[in-house]
Image (spheres, rainbow, N blue to C red):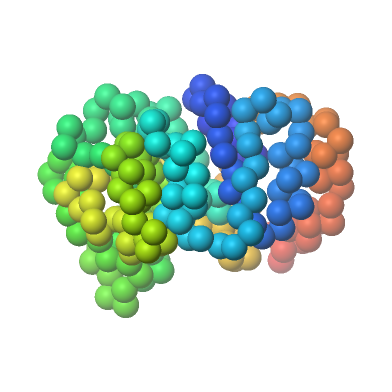
Amino acid sequence: MEHWLCNLHRCGISSALVNSHHHREMVGAFLSRERFSHWVNNVIEGELLGTAGTLRANADKLIDNTVFVIHADNWCQCDLKDFLDFHVYRRPRSTVMTMMTFRTTTPESCGIVKTDNSGIVKRFYEKVDEPHGNLANGAVYLLEPEVISWIARRPDVTDFSTDVIPEFLGRIASWENTGVHRDIGTVESLLEAQYDSQPRACWPNNDPWMCKYLKHPIHKFLSEAMII
């Protein structure tokens, strides 16, 4: 999460909502630090609503803006400023959403997309046994207000991949991340991410929260796991 917030900060984004549910106390302590105090707000979700449900619950804060949607369990290293610039200045005019994509070695575990010559998403296959290629949905999006309005009017819509994306096929631009893109929701992929080059930090690593974090035994465990 620090990596994502650092990237957003570098891109000049001045307002962010963090949706928290699992380990909400830990997330709240992390976000209470001075570096986030003026621009990051923690929204506690008592009952899980799904990605689309979360967007609907916060639609009053999002409706008039281009919305950057991030699933924080993605470990992503790319030119995020170019992703934003593509959406604002270079995406096809008929599109109302830009999806970050990447090339995966495990297509059966991902949502796979098919695009036309303009990079517009025409087909979407969510985690099928016989994947149609290896260009995967990175679960990072830029959404125009029309998408938020559509979600806000539909209380039955909860899942972004299965409920929202199919409705906007033909109006979704794609931007391929050719850098690092990992789903670190498993221990195995989290361990693999330890070998990736570490991005430059935005803030000094000497505040009380970070000092406590750096003493956590998880770092010793990861070091030993990497050696093994």
Whether 203 is drawn above or below 132: the answer is above
Q: Which residue is drawn at 59% across and 63% down?
A: 47
**Residue 107 shows up from this direction:** no
Q: Nearer the viewer, residue 150 or 127?
A: 150
Please report the residue visible at 84 percent of the width from the left and 52 percent of the height from the top.
216
Quadrant of the snapshot with the N terminus: top right
**Name of the residue lying farthest toward the left:** 117
- The foreground one among 174 and 30 is 30
Residue at position x 27%, y 75% in the image: 130
Quadrant of res 68:
top left
- Residue 179, picture quadrant: top left
Depicted 68 relative to depicted 220: above or below: above
* Quarter of the image where one finds residue 38: top right
At 61% from the left and 55% from the top, the residue drawn is: 45
Residue 226: x percent and y percent?
Answer: 69, 59
Please state, as top left, top right, bottom left or bottom right, where the C terminus lies in the image: bottom right
Task: Please determine whether, in this image, residue 14 is positioned above or below residue 33.
Answer: above
Q: Nearer the viewer, residue 22 or 47?
A: 47
Q: With respect to residue 65, does 125 lie above or below? A: below
| Position of residue 36 measured from the top left corner of the image (x, y, whole percent) | 68, 31
Q: Tell me: 145 left or right of 207.
A: left
**Place of residue 199 in the rendered image (x, y in percent of width and height, measured from the top left):** 60, 35
Question: Does residue 173 appear to the left or right of 12 in the view shown?
Answer: left
Would residue 26 be visible to someone looking at this image? yes
State left or right for residue 207 relative to residue 42. Answer: right
Instruction: Pick out the residue farthest to the top.
Output: 12
The residue nearer to you, when weighing 228 against 189, is 189
